[in-house]
Image (cartoon, rainbow, N blue to C red):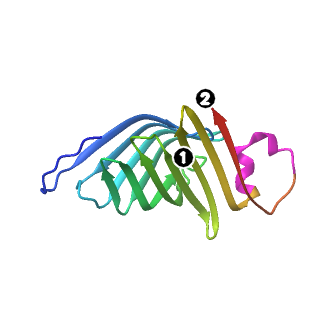
């Protein structure tokens, strides 16, 4: 990632083919940033896959995005996930993420409800990829549509925990 050193405001559009973090896959990510020195940014995702659920034409907005030689960071954003049925408004979910270009490290978290956190990260080290999924007070009702194997089960409540997968 190479950025100009000029102090003048410059805009940029950045396109990434895909990010694969195991339970999270992003295809055709486009980032539009009006000022390289930071500020608001708009993102569009042609295809977003979380576990076994897929959405198309997902958008997000970061209040302030940091685009540096090291990567891209958004500490306060919102993702608009299309609702089922074309007439319903998209679901707006708080979002934060950090992508490090040199290492391929990726970390993203959403907060579907107050106090409920879903976080996925991918770390590459020594030729091994480690993907971690962390859930804190995740509503089981929101998890069931992502995992078809859970559809037959009738249970509720919340789940907290962490799991990781290594490959390579």
Q: Is residue 128 above or below residue 39?
A: above
The residue at the point 39 percent across, 59 percent down is: 62
Residue 83 screen position, x and y as percent: 58, 50
Badge 2, how many Cα within 10 Å: few under 14, some, many 20+?
few
Residue 76: image quadrant is: bottom left
Residue 55 falls left or right of residue 154: left
Q: Which residue is mark 2?
A: 168
Q: Position of residue 84 (x, y in %)?
A: 61, 47
Q: What residue is drawn where x is 35% and y is 48%?
A: 70
Residue wearing tag 1 = 86
Give the residue drawn at x 58%, y 62%. Answer: 111
Residue at figure coordinates x 52%, y 52% from the top left? 108
Q: Which residues are magenta?
A: 141-153
Tag nearer the camera, 2 or 1: 2
Is disc 2 in contact with disc 1, using a CB cutoff of under 8 Å?
Answer: no
Quarter containing the N terminus:
top left
Label 2: which secondary element: loop
Side (left or right) of 89 relative to 73 = right
Which is nearer the eye, 48 or 91?
48
Does the magenta stretch mainly form a helix, a strand or a loop?
helix
As drawn, the residue found furthest toward the front would be 126
Q: Which mark is residue 156?
A: none
Image position of 134 (left or right of 2): right
Find residue 158 and report its horizontal and vertical position in percent: 77, 62
Q: Name the secondary structure under disc 1.
A: loop
Give the distance between the C-alpha atoms of the residues marked 2 and 1, in whole angstroms. Answer: 40 Å
Residue 16 lies, with reference to residue 134, above or below; the image says: above
Precedes in sequence: disc 2 or disc 1: 1
């Amino acid at each position: 990632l190479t950025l100009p050193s000029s102090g003048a405001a410059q805009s940029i559009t950045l396109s990434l083919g895909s990010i694969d973090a195991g339970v999270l896959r992003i295809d055709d990510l486009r980032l539009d940033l009006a000022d390289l020195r930071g500020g608001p940014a708009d993102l569009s995702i042609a295809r977003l896959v979380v576990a076994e659920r897929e959405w198309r034409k997902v958008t997000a907005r970061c209040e302030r995005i940091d685009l540096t030689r090291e990567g891209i960071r958004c500490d306060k954003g919102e993702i608009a996930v299309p609702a089922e049925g074309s007439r319903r408004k998209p679901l707006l979910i708080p979002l934060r993420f950090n992508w490090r270009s040199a290492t391929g490290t990726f970390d993203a978290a959403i907060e579907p409800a107050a106090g409920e956190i879903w976080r996925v990260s991918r770390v590459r080290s020594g030729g091994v990829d480690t993907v971690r999924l962390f859930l804190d007070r995740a509503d089981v009702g929101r998890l069931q549509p992502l995992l078809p194997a859970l559809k037959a089960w009738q249970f509720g409540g919340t789940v907290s925990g962490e799991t990781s997968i290594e490959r390579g």
